[in-house]
Image (tube, rainbow, N blue to C red):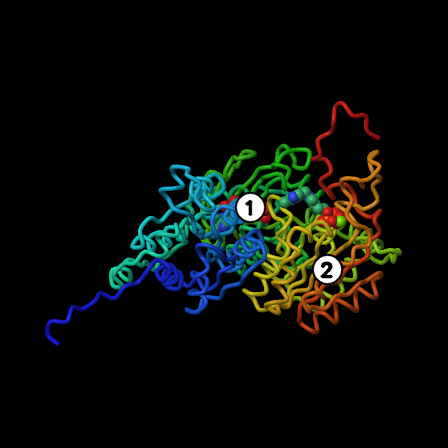
Amino acid sequence: MENEVVQPTLTDGFHLVVDALKLNGLDTMYGVVGIPVTDLARLAQSEGIRYIGFRNEQSAGHAAAIAGYLTQKPGICLTVSAPGFLNGMVALANATTNGYPMIQISGSSDRAIVDLQQGDYEELDQMNAAKPFTKASFRVERPEDIGIGVARAIRAAVSGRPGGVYLDLPAAVLSATVDAQVGADSLIQVVDPAPRRIPSQESISRAIDLLQQAKKPLIVLGKGAAYSQADAEVRKLIESTGIPFLPMSMAKGLLPDGHVQSAASARSLVLAEADVVLLIGARLNWLLGHGKSPQWSASAKFIQIDIEPTEMDSNRKITAPIVGDIYSSVSALLADPELSKVQAEESWVAEIAARKEHNATRMAAQLAAEPAPMNFSSALSAVRDVLEKHPDTYLVNEGANSLDFARNIIDMSSPRRRLDTGTWGVMGIGMGYAIAAAVVSGKPVVAIEGDSAFGFSGMDIETICRYNLPVITVILNNGGIYHGDEASHGSPSDVAPTRLMQNARYEMVIEAFGGVGYSAKDKKELTQALTAALAAGKPALINCQIDPKAGTESGHIKNLNPKSALTAKS
Ligand code: ADP
Ligand code: TZD
Ligand code: MG
């Protein structure tokens, strides 16, 4: 009919969020649903975005963060208002601290009510609450701004030093409608979200000058180097110069730990002796003794490659800063003909080799022992021997002794396979990192967990079983935080603060959800269980009985515990 009124085709906020994510290749979401985002997850799933539902937003957030680290695309975490938002915030802050690209998208309550503090359902000024913990925090107030909000969030998450970004979506924006064409036109496909940062030629020459003067050069690889995926270039730089390298924990495997130039097992020697140090994607924070003595020589000179200009001189003078992305910076070093004059001296290489051999002999003796019950070394030697046959496995690791021993004992041979507690030493990453690693890679994952560490995210064993992921959780169960043998401090009813339940049957937790539980009291049982679990490729949990006396306070960082000036301590 001639006079029929053509109704405009409408879209709404829910659809625009999903369309914006898909347009930018963001194909997975980790979250927990509830008011006002349940339909967002449903719609995402119906539109082909994979939605992985967790039991707690903290785990979902950790999953999103590590997915970002592994893929260089922001990991997406979906949360509900106020409490769900706050549960996710630990993971978002941890992502910012570690430089993982992540976007937490949260629904929020009615702006007018929230701002007048009239007590809305789950009322919180989330955008402002998120600011101190994030690289950027945005709120979208109109459906036609969703495209821009998502684009800005993506850029903030992945450009420069990556980090956590918060994107606030009030319920009213999600349900608001707008003309479909207007909506479609408002979406942005981000072009070049993480632009290369080309270092100046001057900075390259300055660095090479310094390397040419070095008698005892050292390259430190950090997780920024792993993240940047410039694997071939970094390897070429190291092999062509013969300079020994030291991987930070998550850079293990960037070059295989068994590489002749690895100085990992001569760490204290190379830190103390190096005269010129090239940092590639590693900060001189507490993990590197702030670059100061006694760990480092006071006269050592530093070269630092980092995309973040303000990182330079943050802890110690950087003589030759190279501000650039790692791929461009290492490529520029390789392209400079002067680099061919840089060659590590044989005496230095030999000194390191001798120390490595000495330390390896000592460690071999520890690993060969078969104490009953098991201790950390003996249990992890069994895990190491099995994992050597499965080099593609992702390794997630948290705890104190469980972390320190596993980092030293288990060699990595491929890049970005080791995922651990990172810069903060945060507990609770275990199940989230394991789930995301399995989802992103489709490969098997082994999560080595302290018994305390496991408790922080243990309920997501159900998530692992629900999605039938090839995740094997190995609990080094010494019955406590650091150790399980501390006597109560005079309480008639309570155990000591470090104690957890003795002889807890963690293997039964996974059985509740249809996974396979194992208990291992010695190396043989552990070897058999891990071998069988890897062959099955299904959810499994191995509860390893570790001597409650095994383990030291705070693992390797006991020195960071403040001491009471008033309490006489033994
Ligand atoms: P680690 O804990 O392994 O020592 P850090 O997290 O302390 O590593 O340091 C990683 C560093 O890498 C950060 O300073 C970050 O800015 C930097 N970085 C991350 N990605 C890149 C990149 N693509 N190019 C250059 N630097 C990067
Ligand atoms: N809470 C959070 C979120 N992060 C932390 N790092 C801690 C608390 C303190 N903490 C550590 O630094 S390690 C650890 C805690 C509670 C657990 C150590 O016990 P474990 O490991 O059983 O996991 P080991 O093998 O017994 O040492
Ligand atoms: Mg423990």
- x and y percentages locating residue 370 in the rendered image: 87, 58
In this rendering, the label closer to the viewer, 2 or 1? 1
Image quarter for ligand 2 equals top right
Mark 1 Cα within 10 Å, few/some/many (few <14, many 20+)?
Answer: some
Q: Give the amino acid at mark 1.
A: Val
What is the x, y in percent for residue 543?
Answer: 77, 60
Q: Is residue 246 visible?
A: no
Q: Secondary structure at mark 2?
A: strand
Q: Residue 298 at x, y = what percent? A: 63, 32
Judging depth in this view, the residue of 211 and 268 nearest the camera is 268
> Residue visible at 56% across and 34% down?
315
Q: Residue furthest left?
A: 2
Q: Position of residue 107 (x, y in %)?
A: 43, 52
Spatial separation of the CA atoms under disc 2 and disc 1: 24 Å
Taking the spot 44% from the left edge, 53% from the top edge, the residue there is 105
Q: Are marks 2 and 1 in contact (CB under 8 Å)?
A: no
Q: Quadrant of the C terminus?
A: top right
Q: Is residue 58 left or right of residue 297?
A: left
**Quarter-of-image position of residue 503:** bottom right
To which quarter of the image does residue 525 belong? bottom right
Is 25 displayed left or right of 421 in the figure? left
Residue 474's disc is: 2
Q: Is disc 1's CB within 8 Å of ligand 2? A: yes
Asked if residue 460 shows in the view, the reply is yes
The residue to which callout 1 is attached is: 90
Q: Is residue 26 above or below residue 262?
A: below
From this view, report whether residue 402 is shown above or below residue 445: above
- The residue drawn where x is 64% and y is 68% is 470
SS class of the residue under badge 1? helix
The N terminus lies in which quarter of the figure? bottom left
- As drawn, the label of residue 560 is none
Q: Nearer the viewer, residue 112 or 208?
A: 112
